[in-house]
Image (cartoon, rainbow, N blue to C red):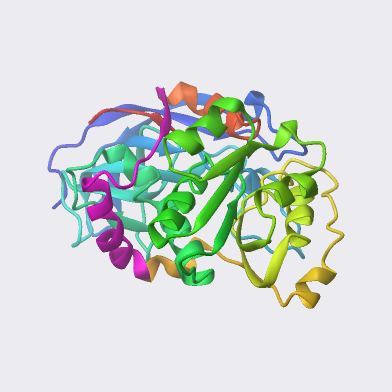
């Protein structure tokens, strides 16, 4: 039911300045203030939300690049002069949609701003029913990254007890969960990360069998042979480039690779080549890229799987949270330099 009294408030936004080549800068994202009417027009099916938590994710770098007419992408480009678009946790302020009412909590696609008017389409937004866990988890563990880890590991890699698993960018929003899922299955799992702090986290907090700092390795091939003398059954790919090249020659026969992301390539003007592709043929390796949106029909199944483990404290999750909408640009850019420890997000409002 729409509000009967109009109310106009200020609405702080983070605006996309223009398309980026190389590493993005804070000047590419500008904080501005406009106004918004806290009333949905009559007969509209839109929903007005107050954003509580906004998510910083590596895929957002792809949306900052200049659109190439003949290229394909999982995500559309940002529009210059408009708020950047991402995922967030929000509270309904007013609704013209029959499935949402004032006070409902949801997670899904919103603008980087204090208030957003959203148009619902299949799997764009999910109502939050479980509030006995931190709401911020719906930007990570119980949101897109969690569903990504679940779909990539279980649906694509089909793990079996006793198999060997390698996870790159293992302390990030997705990687930390893949490692824990692997241990639940009974796999041997090793992760790579970019600092001693992150490596220690993998071993002491997330239960990885071992981990290494890829920045300290002169030869990634030798490093992987040290941790996987008999080879790798499953590789959860988050990095690309030299790491993928080294992994390919260390895969076992009939190994599986779930290609979730390639963060090492997103900011390069000329992406690195991969040289060991023939091993895919020789070792019959399955390499599959995927988009989490292809699996959102399994979201309720995912919640049924993961929530009991969270409540029993058999799955843990580390978040890197900054305060205020103004902190968003630096928080987002930090993930491309490995500054975050765990899932990066920022607080817009605490209800």
Residue 245: quadrant of the picture: bottom right
Question: Residue 274: x percent and y percent?
Answer: 83, 57
Nearer to us in this view, 2 or 331: 331
* Horizontal side of residue 141 vs 44, given as left or right: right
Q: Is residue 320 above or below residue 316?
A: above
Q: Residue furthest front?
A: 229
Question: Residue 51: x percent and y percent?
Answer: 33, 37
* Horizontal side of residue 129 vs 345, given as left or right: left
Seen at 73% across and 31% down, the residue is: 216
Examine the rendering and report whether any part of residue 342 can be seen: no
Seen at 74% across and 46% down, the residue is: 265
Q: How many marks?
A: 0
Nearer to us in this view, 293 or 210: 210
Examine the rendering and report whether any part of residue 53 can be seen: yes
Magenta range: 298-324
Quarter the C terminus occupies = top left
Nearer to us in this view, 313 or 129: 313
Question: Residue 176: x percent and y percent?
Answer: 47, 44
| Membership of 322 in magenta stretch | yes
| Membership of 303 in magenta stretch | yes
Seen at 19% across and 50% down, the residue is: 130
* Horizontal side of residue 162 vs 69, given as left or right: left
Question: Residue 3: x percent and y percent?
Answer: 15, 44
């Amino acid at each position: 039911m729409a509000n009967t009294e109009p109310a106009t408030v200020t609405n702080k936004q983070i605006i996309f300045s223009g398309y980026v080549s190389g590493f993005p800068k804070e000047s590419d994202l500008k904080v501005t203030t406009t106004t918004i009417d806290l009333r949905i027009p009559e007969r509209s099916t839109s929903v007005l939300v107050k954003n509580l938590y906004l998510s910083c994710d590596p895929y957002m770098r792809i949306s900052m690049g200049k659109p190439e007419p003949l290229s394909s992408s999982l995500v559309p480009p940002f529009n210059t002069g408009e708020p950047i678009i991402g995922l967030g946790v929000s509270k309904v302020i007013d609704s013209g949609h029959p499935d949402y009412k004032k006070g409902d909590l949801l997670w899904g696609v919103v603008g980087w701003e204090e208030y957003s008017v959203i148009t619902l389409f299949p799997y764009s937004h999910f109502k939050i029913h479980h509030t006995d866990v931190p709401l911020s988890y719906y930007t990570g563990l119980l949101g897109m990254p969690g569903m990504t880890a679940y779909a990539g590991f279980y649906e694509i890699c089909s793990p079996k007890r006793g198999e060997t698993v390698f996870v790159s960018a293992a302390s990030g929003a997705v990687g930390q969960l893949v490692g824990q899922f692997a241990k639940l299955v009974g796999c041997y799992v090793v992760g790579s990360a970019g600092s001693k702090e992150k490596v220690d986290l993998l071993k002491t907090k997330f239960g990885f069998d071992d981990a290494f700092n890829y920045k300290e390795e002169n030869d990634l091939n030798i490093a992987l042979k040290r941790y996987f003398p008999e080879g790798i059954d499953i590789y959860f790919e988050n990095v690309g480039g030299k790491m993928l090249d080294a992994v390919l020659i260390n895969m076992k026969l009939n190994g599986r690779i779930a290609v979730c992301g390639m963060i090492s390539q997103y900011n390069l003007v000329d992406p690195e080549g991969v040289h060991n592709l023939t091993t895919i043929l020789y070792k019959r390796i399955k390499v599959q890229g995927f988009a989490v949106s292809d699996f959102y029909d399994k979201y309720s199944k995912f919640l049924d799987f993961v929530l009991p483990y969270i409540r029993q404290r058999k799955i843990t999750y580390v978040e890197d949270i900054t305060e205020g909408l103004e902190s968003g640009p630096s928080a987002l850019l930090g993930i491309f330099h490995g500054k975050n420890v765990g899932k990066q997000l920022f607080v817009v409002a605490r209800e």
